[in-house]
Image: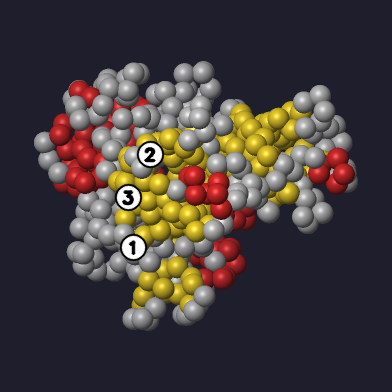
Amino acid sequence: MTSRFAPGGAPAVLALLLATAPSAAQAQSAELADVTDKVFAAWNSTHTPGCAVGIAQGGKVLLTRGYGMADLAGARPILPGTILESGSVAKQFTAAAVMLLVSDGKLKLDDDARTVLPELPVYGRTITFRNLLTHTSGLREWSNLVAWQGWPRGTRVHTQSDVFELVTHQTALNYPVGDYYSYTNSGFLLLRTVVERVSGMPFAQFTTQRIFVPLGMTNTQWRDDFTRIVPGLAQAYSRQADGFHIDMPNDNVIAAGGLLTTVNDWLRWNDHLTKKTLGAGVVDSLTRRMTLTSGVEIAYALGLTVNSYRGLREISHSGSTAGYGTYLARYPEKNDLSIAVMCNVSGAGATGLTHAIVDAMVPGLPRAAAADTVPTNIAAVAKLAGVYRDTRTNTVTVLDTARGRLRRDGGTAFLALRSGGYQLGGSRVQFTTDASGKPVTLRVPTSDGDTVVHAFMAAERWTPSAAELAGIAGRYRNEEIGVTFTVSSAGARLTISPRVGVSDTLSASYRDAFGDGDETIWFVRDKQGRVTAMHFGSARAWDFVSTRVR
């Protein structure tokens, strides 16, 4: 079926009528309003935060609308002109700033980043500006580093200078430069300094003069001082057991995020990308996907993801900062359909809201074929249950059959396929086993054509004795973040503390390893069995080592 909003076919006459028949334009706007009213129904309230949405096509704004409240205490509603924070959608603007310097002849994307950032250690392979822009540098995520110092984001004010020093003090990377894609805000934090040093002006000033003002983005600015009063800014919230609480960013770290803007300005930005107002060399580079050293081409380009949604080419990015959640997408094949969604409440799901609008506007898009499944043989999959370790990030996944199916971390179920193997979400996964049928690995393909291998570690969670935990207790030093961790045991409990007043109780996963989901902590021993080091592993910081000092 052809959408009434798509080019081609009789319904597409609406695009022409927009310029010639106000009544037709009004009718289309009303139809779109019906669509967005349904999509944002959960947030169409005077008692909740909500979202702003903007839709454009063919260079014409079709709808801008607000749902919910920008300020619950002040009873101020979200309007199309309400300012919200971008989250990581900001990365494409930082990438554009870098590309403008390339266009000026002041930078080359594939040059060594140390030509501008001599503070970066020599890591073996060269980190280029392109690596910083595409999350292929291997740099550890700065928010993990400050959390391990005992100061997670939101607990104190982090600044560009102190986080820059922390990132450039790391002596190791997650992986050899260019081998993998690992999302990290650290690269874009460094790019802020690159823009400032090469342009000779503050980052906010450069982007305002070269991007925001020329493109007419009059309501866009950076949160380079989070205490500054910004008229029209929506408060951000998170839902807790007793209701909504204010959840605002309180640091001055920008470029990876921290853009204050409106859906109108985002639609204007997307239109200028289509028109290549900043120059074809700049704009085309933003959508050129990165290739890893293995030859695998990933979906990430320069601050943008170039992928597809239900077979439709999608150029997009999502964002999340404190309570803000956002998504900005354009669909060139549908007469440059552009959708901007900005929400001021965590968990609103801006990506899903955007895609729900696409589904309504472009009906008939193909859906993935349903997997040809058969009933799961619980006895057969029971032997696959156990604790698995991601061989890259070192994070732990637990498979169990407690609810009558093999499930990952208690949630997503494995579906048995008629042809053999299993379906996990949208991926066909593969177990390897030894001659006895004991699992060895779980292999999970990625959307980029890569495969992540999870190694089987144990059939059940480790239950350490008090003596085993006492052998782990001690003090562990990491010079890269300047912290000495205190690991303590009390009976069957193990706690870790990076500083006085901050501690975390660890849950055992496999022998000498603790935690699951987002982060794993594991300990290594020497030949005599004495624990000598403590390691952290997470999705954005794969192996962070602290040496035992006592």
In the image, 66 versus 507, the foreground residue is 507
**Residue 84 — which label?**
none
Q: What coloring was used for the rendering? A: secondary structure
Q: Residue 460: horizontal and vertical position, in percent?
A: 70, 46
Classed neighbour count for the residue bearing mark 2: other residues with Cα under 10 Å, few (<14), some (14–19), many (≥20):
many
Quarter of the image for the C terminus: give it.
top left
In this view of the protein, can residue 407 be seen by the observer?
yes
Q: Residue 137: horizontal and vertical position, in percent?
A: 37, 29
Determine which quarter of the picture holds residue 209: top left
Furthest residue toward left: 200
Pair 3/1: label in front: 1
In the image, 269 versus 518, the foreground residue is 518
Q: Earlier in the sequence, mark 3 or mark 1?
A: 3
- The amino acid at mark 3 is Gln
Q: Secondary structure at mark 3?
A: loop
Instruction: Name the residue beneath numbered marker 2.
Output: 548
Q: Residue 146: horizontal and vertical position, in percent?
A: 33, 49
Classed neighbour count for the residue bearing mark 1: other residues with Cα under 10 Å, few (<14), some (14–19), many (≥20):
few
- The amino acid at mark 2 is Arg
Label 3, label 1: how far apart the Cα atoms are: 12 Å
Instruction: Name the residue beneath numbered marker 3.
Output: 149
Determine contact: label 3, label 1, CB under 8 Å. no
Q: Earlier in the sequence, mark 2 or mark 3?
A: 3
**Residue drawn at 51 percent across, 18 percent down:** 294
**Residue 501 — which label?**
1
